[in-house]
Image (cartoon, grey):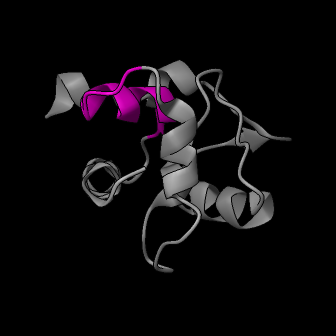
Amino acid sequence: MNDMFKKQVFEIIGMIPSGRMTSYGAVAKAVGYPNHARHVGNALRDYDDDFPAHRVCNATGHITAGCLEEFVRKLKREGIAVEGTKVCDFRRVFWNPLDEI
């Protein structure tokens, strides 16, 4: 993964509004690499504490990050309900970068 890809991924994720979520695949499509959802997840291995990585999950609405408890806590503060690892009503809170930017 190159630095430009990571920079673009971080720019897109930084645009996700509070109370909304997107998927790794949607971010990958938005940066021009539709088959690189896993690379988006890998890019998120290192980020600042205030970065909204908690607003990204897999395409089925499941939080797959290793810091599940922290992400759930942050999402609940933003009004997003989570049961187990699943974001409740994911379709309603889904933010599609291709439609929104």
Q: Is residue 23 magenta?
A: yes
**Depth check, front residue: 95 or 80:** 95
State left or right for residue 11 relative to residue 28: left
In the image, what residue occupies the spot 66% across and 42% down?
81
The image quarter containing residue 96 is top left
**Depth check, front residue: 95 or 8:** 8
Position of residue 31 measured from the top left corner of the image (x, y, whole percent): 26, 35
Position of residue 95 measured from the top left corner of the image (x, y, whole percent): 36, 31
In the image, what residue occupies the spot 25% across and 50% down?
8
State left or right for residue 99 relative to residue 77: left
- The residue furthest bottom is 49
Position of residue 32 measured from the top left corner of the image (x, y, whole percent): 25, 28
Quadrant placement of the C terminus? top left
80 lies above or below 52: above
Position of residue 74 measured from the top left corner of the image (x, y, whole percent): 60, 64
23 lies above or below 51: above
96 lies above or below 65: above
- The residue furthest left is 101
1 lies above or below 84: below
Q: What is the tally of numbered marks visible in this picture?
A: 0
Give the extent of the magenta segment. 21-34
**Depth check, front residue: 88 or 54:** 54
State left or right for residue 69 relative to residue 13: right
Q: Is residue 32 magenta?
A: yes
- The residue furthest front is 2
In the image, what residue occupies the spot 66% across and 60% down?
71
